[in-house]
Amino acid sequence: MISHLDHLVLTSADEAACIDFYTRVVGMSLETFIGGTPPVERKAFKFGNQKINLHNKDSEFEPKAKLPTPGALDLCFIASLPLSDVISRLKECGWPIIEGPVKRTGSQGPILSVYLRDPDGNLIEISEPMNAQPN
């Protein structure tokens, strides 16, 4: 019945800090679009074939989650470059890694991950698939 995830919604207490993190630090692109009823300008972070729509705390778009809360998400992203390059980029941006690299299990098999927090305190896991080891 379900094919794939199209988008999810992130609620932020600080729009500018959130945009900085997801664009400058993580490398997503910022999209501005018109949506809703009545139509209003909205923002989203695009990556691959997905996006994260941005809501600002206390001015979320309807309909919304029953209890939208900044810092309540735990997201895992598969990197488009080697994890060592991700770690280097995070260091260049001065963004702390709170754990990793560590081995985890992703939806498609073993992954190697680092963990960090976005400006709202959401847990962000950035991973690379681990190559199958020959027997």
Image (spheres, rainbow, N blue to C red):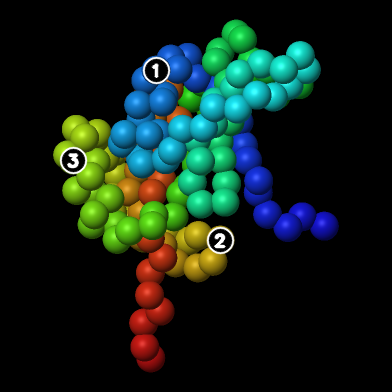
For marks 3 and 2, give the CA distance: 27 Å
Q: Which class describes the residues within 10 Å of circle 3: few (<14), some (14-19), or many (20+)?
A: few
* Contact? badges 3 and 1 (CB < 8 Å): no
Residue 16 is tagged as 1
Residue 128 is tagged as none
Which residue is drawn at the image coordinates 38% and 75% (left, top)? 131
Asked if residue 11 lies left or right of residue 40, the reply is left
| Total numbered badges shown on the rendered structure | 3
User: Dot 1: what SS?
Assistant: helix
Q: Position of residue 76 (x, y in %)?
A: 47, 47
Towards the viewer: 131 or 54: 54
In this view, the mark in front (3 or 1): 1
Is residue 108 visible in the rendered structure shown here?
yes
Instruction: Look at label 2 and name its amino acid.
Output: Ser
Q: Position of residue 8 (x, y in %)?
A: 62, 37
Name the residue beneath numbered marker 2: 107
Q: Is residue 3 above or below residue 63?
A: below
Where residue 84 sits, quadrant-wise, is bottom left
Instruction: Look at label 3 and name its amino acid.
Output: Lys
User: Dot 2: what SS?
Assistant: loop
Which residue is drawn at the image coordinates 29% and 44% (left, top)? 99
Instruction: Look at label 1 and name its amino acid.
Output: Ala
For marks 2 and 1, give the CA distance: 32 Å
Asked if residue 27 lies left or right of residue 95, the reply is right
Q: Earlier in the sequence, mark 3 or mark 1?
A: 1
Which residue is drawn at the image coordinates 69% and 24% (left, top)? 35
Name the residue beneath numbered marker 3: 91
